[in-house]
Image (tube, rainbow, N blue to C red):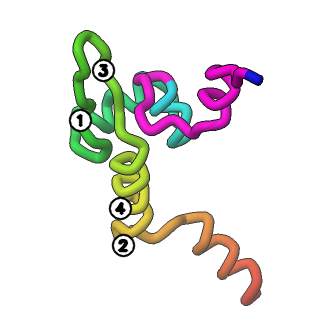
Amino acid sequence: MKRDPMLLHCSLPKRGLSRAEAAHYIGVGNSKFDEMVKDGRMPQPIQIDRRVIWDCRKLDLAFEELSSDGDANPWDEASTSASSA
């Protein structure tokens, strides 16, 4: 029995994402993602022929760096002060 190559394709996770997919992946809109790429918070894309794609692994690393910047989260401070009152 011959296997349908699309079944394998659909079950594989994507490594490269388009701009819109990358923005959605990290939870922001397209314009915010563009801003984050421009200011260095997100990685630059790679180009394969005419396709511009972002590597999921590089997005993951950049996203982890966002949460370890040392800035206090105002929501954490609000919940701490509310629980100690």
The C terminus lies in which quarter of the figure? bottom right
Please give left or right for residue 66 compared with residue 44 in the image.
Answer: right
Where does residue 75 sit, x and y in percent of width and height?
61, 65
Foreground label between 1 and 2: 1
Please check the rendered image and state whether residue 14 is part of the magenta-colored stretch, yes or no: yes
Mark 2: secondary structure: loop
| Tag 3: amino acid | Val
Mark 2 or 4, nearer chain start:
4
Characterize the local packing of mark 3: few (<14), some (14-19) or many (20 or more) Cα atoms within 10 angstroms.
some
Mark 4 or 3, nearer chain start:
3
Who's the residue at 58% across and 74% down the image? Answer: 77
Foreground label between 1 and 3: 3
Where does residue 43 sit, x and y in percent of width and height?
27, 42
**Which residue is tagged 1?**
44
Find residue 65 and name its label: 4
Please give left or right for residue 12 compared with residue 33 in the image.
Answer: right
| Tag 2: amino acid | Gly
Characterize the local packing of mark 4: few (<14), some (14-19) or many (20 or more) Cα atoms within 10 angstroms.
few
Give the residues drawn in magenta, as a range: 2-20
**Which residue is tagged 2?**
70
Mark 1 or 3, nearer chain start:
1
Mark 1 or 2, nearer chain start:
1
